Structures are given as structure tokens and as C-alpha cells.
Image (spheres, helix red, strand yellow):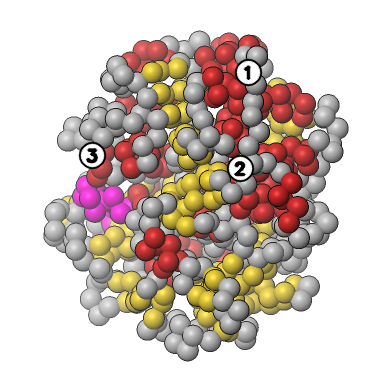
């Protein structure tokens, strides 16, 4: 049923063809009250495509994007895809490392970035270590002020961005396009003819993924793959999927991540939704008011934000969300039940919990239509298939309750890891009797029920987050791999790092928790469980640490050695290891409470952590994730502990 995709030139051509069936005078997106119609939307996409042509950005040229959620991001992303260029993502969470990786490892010539990220770039001296940046020719700066109503846009863009940009100390060879310039030039561009290529087999985008080791890999997706994900959600094919034409969809997960690009953004655009952008929605009280006052009936949030807003004062019946959704990692059982009970009390439905990974286009199963759902990942989308494998017997598991490794196949999965044949082969490591190839991220999953004749699965966690307690104070990954496959693992023993996350998310004020194991030394395979958390403003961090360890001490067999505080809210409830592994590289610190004293912890080179007592009157400071080693600066950061 996918054959008809050959009639389209690109994934954007496919989406446009769907949207042309709708009334073009109706609203496609809203931004601070500014409404852009469908006809104007597609006009902007064409103009931005012409603009990129005029800049000399051609088919198969990769462009790295890191922008705030805004209409311009969507126009840029769609225009690059239809142009045949490769849209490569840069995540705010890993801004400096990703910029270095994009420009050095992938030889990207053009970077498009929001000026709102300038303070991070300046503080980390990202462009001052210019060895290896030879490919970078052009940086286009954008601003969240563009496409606001005129009076707001004028006020927002009156800031002196030129002065800030000068502090980057960019090499003179790099052309700078200043904030607002791209939009002005786009609005006046004309007389450029466009050639329509058939791009379906070309690369549309590639995105970093933490993989099972935490070492960033790069998953490559074609236009056909992305269009296939959208096709699987056609209302005549996937009847449970309930995003409809004119649904008011608030997009909160940052678009600089494949979950938002594919599943939250493009899928909603293909469904005819009216996408609402508001960069301030990450603040829980603001988000609560938006959801109530702007009649939002579809929203994609990180789970931690759901946890935060359901603790805001909301009158019964005021939160009429039809499809509250979150994606990515499995959500914790007890907090999910709590959130859903609070959503129900406010008049909403339960969260739609999807699952997938970057490798599987960030969507392979979801819980649409399942009643009384808690933390089920759901059933496979149409055209996707999969099963659980017992790592001991290599046999397929069909009995409810048993744990196994999830293997899956879908038309929208990646074609492979960029320039990494070994990692690609280790991912696609299973053939069935018909020689159909299945891939795995080694997720541990169990069958928990049925829906319309399909198995319903619950994802428990990734094997790299599965640990066995030792006799001493350490914990170690309790899984062995051979050629990318799990061997010699008893799922009846040990714990998931997610067990720690459940404890933390039940503490008032904690919005997000990311537990991982960091190696004790450079070469060690065992290590220390450490948790990265985001706390709502106004909460005492010392009090949260003490409450956390009081709870951990009740479960004596599973205690983290430290808690890290961070300033910004991440893209999802993720166990992504990229930023915490950088602790090992730079030996940054964290906090620990032993029941009597609060400690500040540092990690010297090739040694165990060193604990030093924190005075009761000393402020616990939060900090942005440590800068990865590749872009390490010897200059002391202002935000160090």
C-alpha cells in the first residue's frame, strides 16, 4: 500500500498534495496571535526554497539547523527538504558538540542558528577553536521575533544582535547573514525558476542518536522513509490515529530533534492540523494558561512538563485536551498513573505514549485508542512489524508478561548509520525465515495485552540502562553483547536506571530526571549511577537532594552516587547518555547526601569520585551540561560548580 509514494517527488511534495485538498484560506499555523493561512504557508516554503537556491545551496548539500520553535523553522526545514538539500539537526542540549561535529565530521558549509543561543556559543568559545572548521562558509542567524505580529516583531528585533555576534570572534572567511535579513530577502525574492527532482530515494535528513553506548551515531533517513511514516497514519489506514484537519496542535518539544521533526511536526502538517508555536510554553504556569485559554486539543510535550502542569491549579473540566502526547523513552509507571488521573480530573484524556527511536523514525508503536492506558508503548503502526526475542533461546516470545528484546521493521526506518557500516550491521542483525531483516536498539519489552487483535507492548527500558547490584558500592551494566545482540542476561535480576527516575519524579518540584551510569575511570566498564534533573523555579535544591536520598535509602540495593542540576529543560524524558558521559571527559561534579551531610562531588582523572562537604549556607548552583571534550576550553566556565 506504499506504492503510490512513487508519484511524488519528495516528502514535502507528498504533504503539499494532501494539504491542497483542504481549504487554503484556513489557518496553517499561529504564532503570538499571528495567523498564517495554508496558501501563504506554501508560498513561504517556495520563497525560502528559491532563497536557498540563490545562496547556492544545492541538491545533496547538507545544512545544519538549530532554531527555536517558530514558523521560520518550519519554512526553512520544508524548503530545504523540497530543494533536495539535507536537513541535519543540531540539538540545543548538545549545542557546542553538535556544531563541532557537524562542521568537522560532516563538512557542512551552512549553519542556520537562532540568536537566542548566542550566549551559549559565546560562553563556550565554540568558534574560537577553529581547527577543522574549514568547511564552514556561511552562518545564517535567525530570531524568534520574525513572524510575530508587526508591533511585537519590531520590539523583539530591536536588540543589538550585531554586537553579540561579534563576540563569537568568527573567522573572516565565514559569511554572516544577520538576524532578520533572510526573512526580508525571502519576501522580495522572485524570478528564480525551480527544478523538481525526484528525491524519494535521496537522503532527507540525518540525526544524531545516543545509540546503546552513548557514543553519538548518525541515523540517515530518505524522503521515502519519512513519507512512509506519514502514509502509515492516513485516516483510512490508521483509524485510531485521531489528529484531524484543523486540530489545534501545540508543539512544545524542540524541533531540533527527530521526534519533533517527523512525528510531531511533519505528521501534524500532513494531517491538516493548525500548529501553534509559543517558545514560552516550557514554563509550567504559562503552559497551563495556553492550554486552557487557547483551546488546544492536541499537544506534544516532554513527559516532565505534563508532570509539572498537572500540579498547577486547574479547575475541573478546564483542560480539554483530546490527544495529549509524549514520545521517546518509556514513561515511568507510577508518575504516569498520577499524571493521567490529574488529566482526567481536568477533563482531558490519558497521554498517548508512543515509542520508537531515531533509528525507527522516532515512531513505531503508540497507544491510540487503548483505554485506561498507563505506560503502555502500544501496538505497531500499520506497515510496521516486530516481535520479542528471548536472548537465551533466540526464540520469539508470545506469552504475556515475559521480557524479551524488541526487534522491528518499518518502511520508515533508517537506511543506516552515516559512514558506519559496522554499527549499521549490528543494528540490523536479525533475519526471519523469509530473510526479512529486523533491527534492534536492544530495548527490553513485554507483552501486556491486546488491542483489535494486535499485541500491546510495554517498553521497560534499554539494556544499557539495565544494571545488577554488586556487593560493593558500585553498579555496573548487567548486559553482554555480541555483534550487537544481547547475550547472557537474566532479566529477572537487577534493576533499570528508570527505577531511580520513578523515585525522583514523585518528589514535588522535580520536572525531569535522566539517570545514567558514568564510568569510574576512562577505561572502566563499570561505574556510578548519576542522575541529571531539572527542578521547577522556587524549589529548594538542598531539600530535593535530601528527600531523594531519604527515598533511595528505603531501597538500599539501588542508590545513585550523585544528582546533577541543570538549567534548561531537555527535549524529553530521555536516558540519552551523550551529555552525562561528558562528565567523564571533563570531570565536572554533582551532589550527594549521606543522611547527615551534603557533599559536592568531583571526578579526578582516572580516580574514584572525591566528596567534599557543602556548607549549609552555600548555594547549590545549577549548570548547563558540561561541554564535551571535542570543544573543551581551558578557560573556566562561569557556570562551573
Say whether disc 3 or disc 1 marks the residue closer to the N-terminus. 1
Residue 585 is inside the magenta segment: yes
Give the label, 3 or 1, closer to the camera. 1
The stretch in magenta equals 580-596
The image quadrant that residue 270 belongs to is top right
Check disc 2 and report its element: helix, strand or loop: loop
Whether residue 298 is visible: no
The x, y position of residue 377, in whole percent, is 62, 65
In the image, is 231 to the left or to the right of 577? right
- Residue at 49% across, 85% down: 394
Say whether disc 1 or disc 2 marks the residue closer to the N-terminus. 1
Dot 3 alpha-carbon crowd within 10 angstroms: few under 14, some 14 to 19, many 20 or more: some
Give the label, 3 or 2, closer to the camera. 2
Residue at the spot of label 2: 199
Residue at the spot of label 3: 632
Dot 2 alpha-carbon crowd within 10 angstroms: few under 14, some 14 to 19, many 20 or more: many
Amino acid at each position: 500500500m506504499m506504492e503510490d509514494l512513487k508519484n511524488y517527488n519528495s516528502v514535502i511534495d507528498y504533504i503539499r498534495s494532501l494539504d491542497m485538498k483542504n481549504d487554503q484560506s484556513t489557518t496553517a499555523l499561529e504564532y503570538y496571535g499571528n495567523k498564517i493561512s495554508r496558501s501563504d504557508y506554501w508560498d513561504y516554503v517556495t520563497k525560502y526554497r528559491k532563497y536557498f537556491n540563490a545562496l547556492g545551496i544545492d541538491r545533496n548539500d547538507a545544512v545544519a539547523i538549530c532554531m527555536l520553535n517558530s514558523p521560520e523553522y518550519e519554512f526553512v526545514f520544508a524548503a530545504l527538504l523540497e530543494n533536495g538539500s539535507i536537513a541535519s539537526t543540531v540539538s540545543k542540549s548538545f549545542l557546542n558538540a553538535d556544531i563541532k561535529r557537524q562542521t568537522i565530521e560532516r563538512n557542512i558549509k551552512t549553519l542556520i542558528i537562532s540568536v537566542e543561543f548566542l550566549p551559549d556559543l559565546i560562553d563556550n568559545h565554540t568558534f574560537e577553536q577553529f581547527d577543522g572548521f574549514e568547511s564552514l562558509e556561511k552562518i545564517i542567524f535567525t530570531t524568534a521575533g520574525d513572524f510575530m505580529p508587526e508591533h511585537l516583531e519590531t520590539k523583539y528585533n530591536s536588540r543589538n544582535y550585531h554586537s553579540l555576534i561579534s563576540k563569537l570572534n568568527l573567522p573572516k572567511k565565514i559569511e554572516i547573514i544577520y538576524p532578520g535579513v533572510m526573512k526580508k530577502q525571502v519576501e522580495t525574492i522572485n524570478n528564480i525558476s525551480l527544478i523538481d527532482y525526484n528525491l524519494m530515494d535521496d537522503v532527507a535528513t540525518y540525526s544524531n542518536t545516543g545509540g546503546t553506548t552513548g557514543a553519538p551515531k548518525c541515523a540517515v533517513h530518505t524522503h521515502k522513509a519519512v513519507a512512509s511514516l506519514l502514509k502509515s497514519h492516513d485516516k483510512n489506514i490508521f483509524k485510531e490515529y485521531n489528529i484531524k484537519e484543523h486540530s489545534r496542535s501545540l508543539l512544545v518539544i524542540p524541533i531540533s530533534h527527530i521526534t519533533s521533526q517527523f512525528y510531531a511536526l511533519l505528521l501534524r502538517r500532513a494531517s491538516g492540523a493548525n500548529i501553534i508555536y509559543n517558545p514560552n510554553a516550557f514554563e509550567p504556569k504559562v503552559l497551563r494558561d495556553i492550554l486552557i485559554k487557547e483551546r488546544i486539543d492536541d499537544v506534544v510535550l516532554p513527559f516532565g512538563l505534563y508532570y509539572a502542569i498537572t500540579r498547577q491549579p486547574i479547575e475541573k473540566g478546564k483542560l480539554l485536551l483530546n490527544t495529549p502526547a509524549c514520545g521517546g523513552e518509556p514513561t515511568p509507571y507510577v508518575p504516569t498513573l498520577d499524571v493521567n488521573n490529574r488529566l482526567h480530573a481536568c477533563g482531558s484524556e490519558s497521554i498517548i505514549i508512543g515509542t520508537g527511536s531515531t533509528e525507527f523514525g522516532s515512531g513505531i508503536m503508540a497507544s491510540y485508542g487503548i483505554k485506561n492506558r498507563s505506560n503502555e508503548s502500544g501496538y505497531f503502526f500499520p506497515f510496521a512489524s516486530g516481535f520479542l526475542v528471548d536472548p537465551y533461546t533466540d526464540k520469539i516470545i508470545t506469552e504475556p508478561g515475559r521480557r524479551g528484546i524488541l526487534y522491528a521493521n518499518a518502511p520508515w526506518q533508517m537506511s543506516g548509520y552515516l559512514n558506519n557500516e559496522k554499527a549499521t550491521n549490528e543494528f540490523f542483525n536479525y533475519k526471519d525465515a523469509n530473510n526479512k531483516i529486523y533491527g534492534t536498539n536492544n530495548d527490553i519489552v513485554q507483552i501486556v495485552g491486546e488491542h483489535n487483535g494486535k499485541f500491546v507492548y510495554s517498553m521497560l527500558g534499554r539494556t544499557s540502562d539495565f544494571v545488577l547490584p554488586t556487593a560493593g558500592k558500585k553498579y555496573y551494566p548487567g548486559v553482554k553483547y555480541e555483534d550487537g545482540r544481547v547475550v547472557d542476561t537474566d532479566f529477572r535480576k537487577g534493576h533499570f536506571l528508570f527505577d531511580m527516575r520513578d523515585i525522583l519524579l514523585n518528589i514535588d518540584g522535580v520536572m525531569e530526571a535522566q539517570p545514567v551510569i558514568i564510568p569510574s575511570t576512562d577505561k572502566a566498564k563499570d561505574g556510578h549511577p548519576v542522575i541529571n534533573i531539572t527542578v521547577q523555579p522556587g524549589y529548594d535544591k538542598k531539600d530535593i537532594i535530601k528527600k531523594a536520598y531519604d527515598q533511595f535509602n528505603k531501597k538500599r540495593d539501588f542508590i545513585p552516587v550523585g544528582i546533577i542540576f541543570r538549567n534548561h529543560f531537555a527535549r524529553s524524558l530521555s536516558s540519552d547518555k551523550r551529555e552525562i558521559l561528558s562528565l567523564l571527559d571533563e570531570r565536572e561534579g554533582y551532589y550527594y547526601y549521606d543522611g547527615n551531610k551534603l557533599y559536592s562531588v568531583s571526578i579526578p582523572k582516572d580516580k574514584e569520585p572525591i566528596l567534599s562537604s557543602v556548607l549549609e549556607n552555600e548555594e547549590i548552583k545549577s549548570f548547563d551540561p558540561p561541554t564535551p571534550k571535542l570543544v573543551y576550553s581551558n578557560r573556566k566556565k562561569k557556570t562551573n560548580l
